[in-house]
Image (cartoon, rainbow, N blue to C red):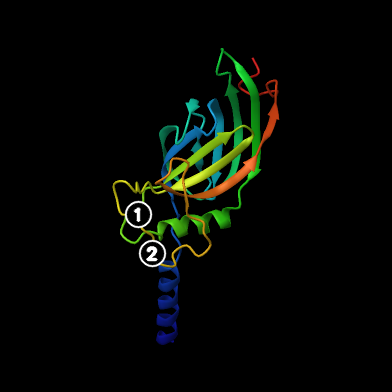
Amino acid sequence: MKIKLLLILATLFILIGCEEKPFYVASIGNGGSLDGPYVLGPIGVADVLGGGGGFGYGAVNGYPGASADIGRMGVPKHIEGYWAKQNPNARGYVAFYRISADIDSELAEKKIRTLRNYYQYFKGKTGSMQVLVERERVRIFYTLYCPSHRADCSGKEGADPNGWVIDSPIKGLDVVVLFDGKGEMSLTPFPDSPYEN
């Protein structure tokens, strides 16, 4: 009887010890554009842990764009929000965009884990979630900010068999693409959007 009880207790301790802890992946957020000036916001990315981050950083132009502390964010699962293309020659906007889309969180987690185990020498683990717009196209990148001009960012042999780790738009910074989708476009503001009035 005592042996059975000890075995049950030992099994419970093993199972409790193996319980997976929350997987937080980013504490920095970037919001930017790849084709000129935009106003972002509000744009929210929900994560699998029930939290998420806000990327409505207002006026942005370029990559990686505006930056902010987003707390602790897990693997993304949904993106929703609005952005508007600014008129480069005058005040106002030339187009309005919105999106509401699910993100393949299982694939996103695989890509994040690939990048986190990619580097041979670089040990940084502070990730950044980046939301980038280009007309109706919106992408979410994830990076660990290994700047190849200042650090050895070589990958371990066989660390990325799927080719998920790519060069960022500014070159010399590795990213993985967690989402690449298209929102809706309108020449007039969407009802109930922040640009309606």
Is residue 53 visible in this depiction of the protein? yes
Disc 1 crowd rating (10 Å Cα; few below 14, some 14-19, many 20+) is many
Residue 14 image position (x, y, % from top left): 41, 73
Among the 4 quarters of the image, the one containing residue 152: bottom left
In the displayed structure, 108 sits above or below 185; it is below
Foreground residue, 38 or 50? 38
- Seen at 53% across and 43% down, the residue is 140
Foreground residue, 175 or 127? 175
Residue 87 — which label?
Answer: none
Left or right, 192 with reference to 30: right
Residue 111 image position (x, y, % from top left): 51, 56
- Seen at 43% across and 58% down, the residue is 21
Three-letter amino acid code of the residue under disc 1: Cys
Residue 180 image position (x, y, % from top left): 60, 45
Foreground residue, 19 or 71? 71
SS at badge 1: loop
- Write down the residue under mark 2: 156
Three-letter amino acid code of the residue under disc 2: Lys
In the displayed structure, 96 sits above or below 105; it is above
In the displayed structure, 162 sits above or below 39; it is below
- Seen at 61% across and 22% down, the residue is 194
- Write down the residue under mark 1: 153
Residue 125 image position (x, y, % from top left): 36, 52
Foreground residue, 163 or 102? 163
Quarter containing the N terminus = bottom left
